[in-house]
Image (cartoon, rainbow, N blue to C red):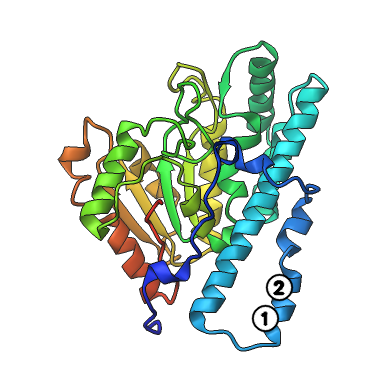
Amino acid sequence: MAEKRGSIRSFFTPAAKKTKKDDADETTEDAIAPLRPSNVVNADAGADAKEGGSTLTDAQRERVELNKQLARSKAAQREATKIAEVAAANGVAPNIEDLLVESTWREILEPEFKKEYFGNLKTFLKREWSSGAKVFPATKNVFRAFNSCATANVKVVILGQDPYHDDGQAMGLSFSVPKGIKVPSSLSNIYKELGDDLGCKKPTHGDLDKWATQGVLMLNASLTVRAHQANSHSKKGWEVFTDAAIRSLSKKQTNLVFMLWGKNAQEKERLIAKDGNHLVLKCPHPSGLSAHRGFYGCKHFSQANAYIEKKGGVPIDWQIE
């Protein structure tokens, strides 16, 4: 049984107040040289050495680890942004696989890049981008769900269907929208359940990046979509790729929590390794059409945290500030 700890809110350092410019694009606010994947993974080696010379409390170690995860996430996103910007400056579409820069995900998914279906997907996406069609999310954010969280840090998996297809909404994390964009109805319903389940205050924005850096993998089945055309990039190869990600992760890691909301997500249960001691939580989708049919009252967030703590882990701070 895990040692009893203090309040989960005490584990996390409050975020500094940001300007509108900061909110517009966090991935470019830190103008430092981009890191290659190997550097991203090893970026905290110096911090590890410093920790070895002193005795830290559990809470301090947890805070240090969270800060490391945040630093790795920002470094990976900066690298993806740089790759996308260089391609745009040269007037070409990027090689989609180059945008997956988080090394642990790249290691397990690189075999997919060599398969015929992925070649067909690349051809389709390059044709879409080259035609001038508006595609969401921005290329730098296509693999944001993976780049935000190394495989070893994943605790919870939340599956969506495809990115939001209206202007400014999609940011590469399922259900999440950037600050300044109206909170979609499904996310508003998620916030309502969080309030009823854990007493979380309703946030004023829909940016879920805080969850991602704590180990919540928010993954859509399809990672791109044409503007204003829902499911327009489905059946093009993305589902095969994200299925491979789910299957590989569930084999590689143990004690994960999978939140499967709605029929489409629940069909992915077949991919989850049976010997991984994972917790699979199922309920209707949080959309306005189905939230009242069992999403409200599902208590998935408290169940997830109870399971994580039971397995000796640090629970997720679900409160979005």
Residue 88, image x and y in percent? 76, 24
Task: Quickly name the residue at label 2.
Answer: 47
| Residue depicted at x 66% and y 18% | 129
Q: Is residue 100 visible?
A: no
Instruction: Give the vertical position of 266 relative to 239 (above or below).
Output: below
Asked if labels 1 and 2 touch by Cβ distance under 8 angstroms, the answer is yes
Report crowding for label 1: few under 14, some 14 to 19, many 20 or more residues within 10 A (C-alpha): few
Residue 48, image x and y in percent? 70, 76
Marker disc for residue 51:
1
Q: Which sits in the foreground, 65 or 303? A: 65
Residue 289, image x and y in percent? 22, 30
Q: Amino acid at mark 2?
A: Ala
The quadrant holding residue 61 is: bottom right
Q: Which sits in the foreground, 224 or 115? A: 224
| Residue depicted at x 79% and y 50% | 36
- Secondary element at image label 1: helix
State left or right for residue 170 relative to residue 144.
left
State left or right for residue 97 relative to residue 143.
right
State left or right for residue 148 relative to residue 293.
right
The quadrant holding residue 304 is: bottom left
Residue 308, image x and y in percent? 39, 69
| Residue depicted at x 42% and y 43% | 159
- Secondary element at image label 2: helix
State left or right for residue 277 relative to residue 111.
left
Q: On the rendered image, what quadrant is the N terminus found in?
A: bottom left
Marker disc for residue 313:
none
Q: Is residue 144 visible?
A: yes
